[in-house]
Image (tube, rainbow, N blue to C red):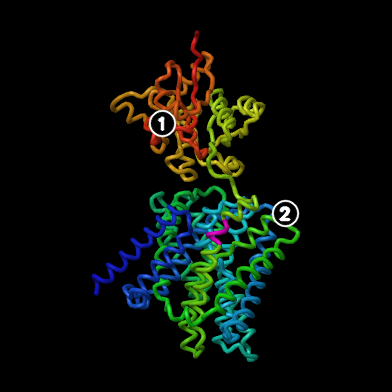
Amino acid sequence: MGEHAILSLSFILLAGMLCQWFAWRVKFPAIIFLLAAGIVAGPVTQWLNPDQLFGDLLFPFVSLAVAVILFEGSLTLKIQNIPGLERVIRNLITLGALITWMITTLATRTLLDFSWSVSFLFGALMVVTGPTVIMPLLRTVRPKENVASILQWEGILIDPLGAILAVLVFEFIVSGGGVEGGFAAGLLVFGKMILIGILFGAAGGLLFGFLLKKYWIPHYLHNISALALVCVVFAVSNVFEAESGLLSVTIMGIWLANSKGLELDDILDFKESLSILLISMLFIILAARMNLDAFIDLGWPALAVFAVIQFVIRPVSVHLCALGSKLTMNERHLLSWIAPRGIVAAAISALFAIRLEYLGYQDASRMVPLTFIVIIGTVLLQSATAGPLARFLKVAEPENKGFLIVGANAVAQIIAEELKKNGIHTLMTDQNWSSVTEAKLKGLTAYWGNPVSEHAERNLNLMGIGNLLAMSPQVELNALAAQYYRLEFAPSSIFTIRNAQPTAGTEETKAAFKYSGRVLFGDSVTFQDLEQMLHHGAEMKTTQLTEEFTYENYLEQQGAQRVSLFAIDANEVVHVFTAEPDFVPKAGWKIMALAVKQEA
């Protein structure tokens, strides 16, 4: 028995990571593959039985996992990111939630003949979207900042509020819901949830922020301390009022995210990894508990409920909530299309269905497969169509092909100009005002200031930027920028130029910076070398490779005073020459190089 439990847990972890990896390869939200893995392992093969595996710990584990996921998402919610959009977000989590709740309830009652009690509960569950499905979708679709900010805030805030609404409806049902104090009792429960959630969340955020600012927690304990405190706040809040913990951890995360002077990058990195692990496990576990016969029994009315939610409720809700806002009509259309349901709806529906069945509500068991139909339907449809729709509506960010260039000196400027000529977006940063002014006069986009400052974090627009070129003459600034932006860009997309020729042995090892990026243009090329070449009249030149003029012919060309910098392939993707390039230019590619003219 013990061996089977260990094998099952290992399978869940392995299957979750494989699903996440496959989703990354095909650029599709992982939830679909996770649900498929759970269905195959559970109802199809009967190999995984979560109730038997976890026993009484199943739903406590699910609850704690959802709390950690919500906390991680709320840590990214900064008030400064939503200027002018506050009203839209507020409307979506209030008026929009009410519209979704009421119309879904009517559709469920009419089409599936659920009891009014279960219909109201299902309608409350469908209010929830959630970061577990929104964030992977946003990474794939890459909508413009307005749309992304609204969806992110809505997804994270509506999770605890929607869960509280569902709990309120549930409490109303189990309390009798009659005229003898049922409604008043429900309102009292709701008020206590909000009050306790805010108090405990703010207290947890204030306490943890105070401990960090006073340096009373060593750096290596930041992550585990945050996790422990989140679990304690969630649990204690629930002790004072059941199901208020989700709101508490959300408030705690928002408090920390908007506190000044706190370094949360490492905590965010840890929590993101933990959230991916928990999400992977939760979807597989909950999918493995499903009964496939229940799906068939629901029939076409279940698809009709899904259609009403997708094609009627969401568009009506968004367009009403966006009235008077600065959102364009195309942005509103995209918002109307994206509202996938996720793990909170799945977890709470499973929990409440069990409890209601004990109370004699026979149709409560049908609520779980209906919830999963909506989850699978919204995620499948929106994942497959949101990207093309965003591009059709022209509200998608450009692909991250551009370059953030640290330094606006003469070398950086000539490189940025040539990249711009080839249709590649660049953004230069420098603390030298005259260099920034000169770059702007040449039509280049430039930022005056320290690229690793708090001001830069707030004001640098990295839309369409996916690479870093550290090309300052200051070796320390280059290394610092490479380390600072390693959470923003992939390690393979961070490049720094040498400021001195490498030396062999211990001296080189001692002088090396950790996380300083890949070496630009080869080990033998330094910033001073490029400066000298410019001084001797070097110019940027882009050479087109063909079947007749191959890369081998290009290398055989005379002229030692030439440094190959970039190669642009047939798909307009830029490849950077490094000490160890991982590409070979082919026919149809272009090569950008800095070359000194040869005298006749």
Residue 410 is covered by the magenta coloring: no
Residue 429 visible in the current orientation: no
Part of the protein shown in magenta? 382-386
Residue 300 visible in the current orientation: yes
Furthest-right residue in view?
A: 324
Residue 578's mark? Answer: 1
Q: Quadrant of residue 338?
A: bottom right
Residue 326's mark? Answer: 2
Nearest to the observer: residue 535 or residue 33? 33
Label 2: state its secondary structure.
Answer: loop
* Above/below status of 314 relative to 271: below
Which residue sits at x=55%, y=81%? 170
Which residue sits at x=59%, y=27%? 432
Amino acid at dot 2: Lys
* Above/below status of 103 relative to 427: below
Amino acid at dot 1: Thr
Nearest to the observer: residue 93 or residue 47? 47
Residue depth check, mark 1 versus mark 2: number of the one nearer the observer: 1
Which residue sits at x=63%, y=52%? 392
Residue 285's mark? Answer: none
User: Is tag 1's residue or tag 2's residue first in the polypeptide sequence?
Assistant: 2
Residue 328: horizontal and vertical position, in percent? 71, 54
Residue 257: horizontal and vertical position, in percent? 55, 54
Could you tell me which quadrant the N terminus lies in? bottom left
How far apart are labels 1 and 2 at the CA level?
A: 45 Å
Q: Would you call the spot at circle 2 few (<14 residues within 10 Å), some (14-19), or many (20 or more)?
A: few
Q: How many marks?
A: 2
Nearest to the observer: residue 548 or residue 29? 548
